[in-house]
Image: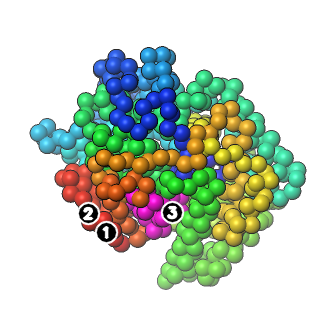
């Protein structure tokens, strides 16, 4: 899910957070919660159409066999330091287990990343991928606080966002730099004006405590969990806070919990460059001619030339908007999240070379949460709000300019884009929590940690760092030699067997297992 100035569609650049000392730190502290909230009964009903903040659209299609998806609302404290104070409503969705009742393990809770992604809309979209897991689990997901239907953060309106996403995110001179910083200030001020009461309470620690409440309300003795991208960080923070409540858990597309914002952004620059290299080599290696270059180097050179041209001469995009350099870079990044999208990237580049920017702009719109009718989900607002509440560092333009050579060396295409994204939290109304999250979880059940060697958004090295940070005897590493963000949804049989084997039967693969 994106930060508007950098490509983070389903990823996070190692956000940081503070473990609120007013709560119980690293221990299982559910006894401190308002006991009325864990006792609440959920009223499950057929799901409505997604709200505008969730992205809009139609209600989820029935499950195989005709069963309807069920939705409910759970109450949680606005401020976990005041559990008997004001509450907010959190939106949940579930598909009940399809197998015999006697074989049901419990609920399997999903977070698909972002931060800022709606789990209520994402789970049905990928339900076929998790059909095997549904044989023994109720599949459950939710809109985290600040997201979708769960007390959504509000910042700019739709017309303002159209203008915002057209800005030059890689300024070349003082005037462009001033415009970028002014736009950032305007965006952040709008968030404060429209969501001031909520902004201090959207940290990842708050969402982790919501998941502990969710476990109790769902009636599970342990939290069985599947976290993807940012969801791995959320899962790691949960394991740190509630280690003895962790059931069977899988982290896929793993955030490096040891990095600060700068390190994470630089890692993403390298990751997206690796993915672009792989895309270019794949196109050039095909038996038929690659339509966007005669060699991998030619493919990259032509992309660079296109982006340079777009900096001063945008192409017609999706009327009335034009394809700017920023939108094109965003669209290319979106397509690198999955090898399945590479064909769309090829078509989009071929189209752009002919003077038409529609496909690349559509990819960029997808990254930014814009629907075809021009409405935006609150993805961008939630993404920035959660990141800025989590991330302690605040970067100035001078900081970025000092780091630009290193970022550009990592990726001529993505380096500047990601470096300037670091100013997104400058002037934010709420102080950031910490340099990086604490995910140490002594006493936790084993957690299967799956890293993809070709992952652009959460580079492969983060999996090993997560294993080490979780602590001895907790993290079990599985490597997938593949492309795209995450591993389970690539349909790789080896990865699926390993993940399903643990979640369904409690059988862990040997740590260090490699799938290809």
Secondary structure type for disc 2: loop
**Residue placed at 88% from the left, 53% from the top?**
174
Q: CA distance from mark 3 to mark 1?
A: 18 Å
Q: Which residue is mark 3?
A: 459
Q: Is residue 189 left or right of residue 145?
A: right
Is 130 within the magenta? no
**How far apart in space, not on screen, are marks 2 and 1 (Cα)?**
7 Å
The percent coordinates of residue 444 (x first, y second) are: 31, 47
Q: Is residue 476 above or below residue 225?
A: below
Find disc 1 in the rendering and name its residue.
513
Image quadrant where residue 508 sits: bottom left
Label 1 crowd (10 A; few <14 / some 14-19 / many >=20): some
Asked if marks 2 and 1 touch (Cβ < 8 Å), the reply is yes
Q: Secondary structure at mark 1?
A: strand
Quarter of the figure that contains the C terminus: bottom left
Q: Around disc 3, counting alpha carbons within 10 Å, would you say few (fewer than 14), some (14 to 19), or many (20 or more)?
A: many
Between discs 3 and 2, the one toward the N terminus = 3
Quarter of the image where one finds residue 119:
top left
Q: Is residue 360 visible?
A: no
Q: Which residues are magenta?
A: 450-467
**In terms of depth relative to the viewer, which is nearer, 353 or 417?**
417
Asked whether the viewer can see residue 304, the reply is yes
Question: Does label 3 or label 1 sit earlier along the sequence?
Answer: 3
**Mark 2 — residue?**
509
């Amino acid at each position: 899910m994106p930060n508007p100035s950098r490509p983070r569609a389903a990823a996070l650049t190692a956000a940081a957070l503070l473990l609120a000392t007013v709560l119980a730190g690293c221990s299982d502290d559910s006894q401190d919660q308002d006991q009325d909230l864990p006792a609440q009964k959920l009223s499950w009903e057929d799901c409505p159409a997604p709200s505008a903040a969730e992205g809009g659209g139609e209600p989820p299609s029935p499950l195989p066999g005709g069963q309807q998806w069920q939705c409910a609302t759970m109450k949680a404290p606005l401020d976990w330091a005041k559990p008997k104070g004001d509450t907010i409503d959190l939106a949940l969705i579930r598909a009940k287990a399809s197998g015999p009742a006697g074989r049901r393990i419990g609920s399997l809770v999903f977070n698909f990343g972002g931060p800022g992604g709606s789990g209520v809309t994402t789970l049905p979209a990928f339900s076929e991928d998790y059909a095997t897991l549904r044989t023994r689990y109720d599949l459950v997901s939710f809109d985290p606080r600040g997201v979708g239907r769960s007390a959504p953060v509000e910042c700019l309106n739709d017309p303002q966002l159209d203008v915002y996403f057209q800005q030059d995110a890689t300024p070349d001179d003082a005037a462009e730099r001033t415009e970028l910083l002014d736009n950032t200030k305007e965006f952040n001020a709008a968030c404060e004006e429209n969501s001031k009461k909520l902004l201090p309470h959207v940290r990842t620690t708050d969402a982790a405590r919501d998941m502990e409440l969710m476990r109790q309300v769902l009636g599970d003795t342990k939290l069985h969990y599947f976290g993807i991208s940012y969801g791995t960080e959320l899962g790691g923070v949960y394991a740190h806070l509630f280690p003895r409540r962790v059931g069977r858990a899988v982290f896929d597309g793993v955030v490096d919990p040891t990095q600060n914002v700068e390190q994470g952004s630089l890692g993403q620059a390298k990751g997206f460059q690796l993915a672009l290299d792989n895309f270019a080599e794949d196109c050039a290696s095909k038996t038929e001619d690659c339509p966007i270059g005669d060699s991998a180097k030619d493919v990259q050179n032509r992309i660079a030339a296109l982006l340079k041209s777009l900096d001063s001469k945008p192409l017609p995009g999706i009327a009335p908007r034009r394809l700017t350099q920023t939108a094109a870079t965003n669209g290319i990044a979106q397509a690198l999240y999955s090898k399945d999208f590479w064909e769309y990237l090829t078509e989009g580049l071929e189209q752009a070379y002919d003077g038409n920017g529609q496909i690349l702009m559509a990819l960029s719109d997808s990254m930014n949460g814009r629907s075809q009718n021009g409405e935006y989900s609150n993805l961008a607002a939630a993404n920035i709000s959660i990141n800025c509440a989590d991330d302690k560092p605040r970067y100035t333009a001078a900081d970025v300019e000092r780091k630009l050579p290193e970022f550009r060396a990592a990726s001529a295409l993505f380096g500047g884009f990601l470096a300037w994204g670091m100013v997104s939290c400058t002037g934010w109304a709420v102080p950031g929590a910490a340099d990086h999250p604490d995910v140490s979880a002594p006493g936790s059940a084993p957690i299967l940690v799956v890293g993809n060697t070709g992952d652009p958004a959460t580079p492969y090295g983060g999996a090993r760092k997560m294993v080490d940070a979780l602590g001895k005897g907790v993290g079990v590493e599985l490597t997938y030699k593949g492309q795209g963000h995450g591993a389970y949804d690539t349909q790789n049989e080896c990865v699926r067997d390993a993940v399903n084997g643990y979640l369904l039967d409690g059988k862990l693969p040997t740590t260090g297992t490699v799938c290809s």
